[in-house]
Image (cartoon, rainbow, N blue to C red):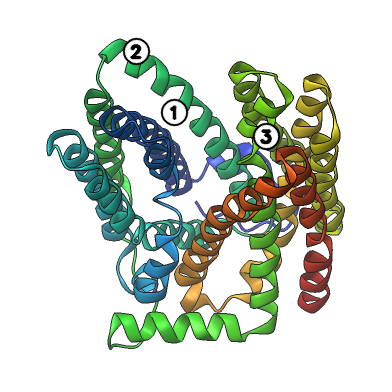
Amino acid sequence: MTITADRPATYREVLADPVYRLLFGTRALAIAADSLRILALSTLIYAATSSALLGALAFGAGFLPQLLGTTLLGAVADRVRPRRVITLGYALEALTAVLLATAGLPAAANLAVVAAVACLVPVFGGAAARVTAERLRGDAYVLGRSLSTMSSSAAQLAGLAGGGAVLAALGRPQHALLVSAALHAIAAVAVRTRLPDLDPAPTAAGSVVRHSWHGNRALLADRAVRRLLVAQWLPPGFAVGAEGLLVAYAAQRGWGTATAGYLLGCLPVGMFLGDFLVGRFVAPARRERLSAPLVALLGVPLIGVGLTGSPVVAAAALLCSGAGFSYKLGLQREFLAAVPQELRGQAFGLLTAGLMTAQGLGPAVFGGIALGTGAGWAVALAGGATCLGVFAVGVARGNAR
C-alpha cells in the first residue's frame, strides 16, 4: 500500500506499508548489529594492542570513508534493483564480522577492512531511502523518517548495552562479532525473501563512477539541494563534536566514568523523545517553521553543559539538546521535493556520507580545541557553533520557498 496523504500522518499508517515495515525492521536489526560489532572490535583491538588510540579508531573507522564511497559509487543506489543492493549490503556486513572474528588479522588490517566496507554504506542506505521515499508520500514520508531515527537511537542503545552483556556472557569479543554477523545475515535473508524486486530508477547507461561523479556535481550545483544538505550536515557535526568530549569533560570535572556513561546516554534519549513529540504531535507546516528554533535547542544547552559544574544540570541540558536533533524533520519534505527523482538514491547516499563526515570531523576539531581550552570550554564552543546552524537552516528554507 502506498500512502499519499498530505495531512498529518500517524505511525499506524506508516507501519501499515509492508515494504516500509520490512525496511524499518531490518535497519533497526542491522544498527544493533553494527553497535555490537563496533564495541566488540574496539575491545578486541584494545586487548591486542593496549592502545587507547587504536581502540578509539574502531569507533570512527566507518565514518570518513563513506564520502569516498558515495563519490565513486553513489549512482549504484539508483541504477541497480534495490533488493539486490540492500541484500548485498547486509550480507557484506555479515561476512565482514565473520572475517574480523576468525581471521586473526593485525589491528591495522581490521580497521582497513571496516573502512573499506564503510565506503559502500551510502550505496546500500541510499537504495533503502529511495524505496522509502517512493512508498510513503506527504507527511507519511516525514513521519517514516522520524520513526527510522527513533529506531536508530533505540537500536544503538540496545546494541551498546546488549553488547556489554553479550561480551560478558560469551567471554571473547570474537564470539560477539559472530553474533553481529548472524544478525546481519538475518537482515539479508529477510530483505532477499520479502522485499519485492522493484525496478531501478531510469538512468542512462555508462560508467558507474562517471555517473556518480556527475550526479554528485549536479546535486551540489543545485542551490536549493546544496543548502538543504549543508543545513543537515553542520549542526549535527558540531553537536557530535561536543558529544565526543563528554568522557574527558566528566573526568576533568572529577565526576568519574560512570557519570560519563550516564551523560552519553542522555543525548540519544533526548533525540528519541524529540523525534517522537515533534514528528507525531506537531503539524507539518509548524514543524517546518520550527526547524530553525530547534537548531537553537540543539546548541544552546550544550553551552550550558560546558559551563555548569553540576552533573544533574548537564544531564538535563543534554536531554534538551538531544531533542533539538528533530529540527531535521522540518527539512525532509523540502529536501525530497528539491532532489530530481532519478537521483534520489544518490542524494540520500550523499546526505548520509556528508553527515558521517561531519560527525567524524567534529570530535577531531573540538578535541584539538580542548587541548588548549579544557574540555568544558570546548563543549561550550561546540554548542555555540551548533547555534550558527540557525542561519544555515534559515537560508535553506528561504531558498526552498
Residue type indicated by callout 3: Leu
Choose the circle earlier in sequence order: 2 or 3: 2
Residue 397 visible:
yes
Badge 2 marks a residue whose secondary structure is: helix
Q: Which residue matches tag 1?
A: 159
Looking at the rendered image, the quarter that the C terminus falls into is: bottom right
Q: Is residue 232 left or right of residue 48?
A: right
Q: Position of residue 369 (x, y in %)?
A: 68, 52
Which of labels 1 and 2 is toward the front?
2
Badge 3 marks a residue whose secondary structure is: helix
Residue type indicated by callout 2: Ala
Residue type indicated by callout 1: Gly
At 29% from the left edge and 58% from the top edge, which residue is drawn?
A: 116
Q: Furthest residue to the left? A: 103
Residue 267 disc label: 3
Q: Nearer the viewer, residue 347 or 268?
A: 268
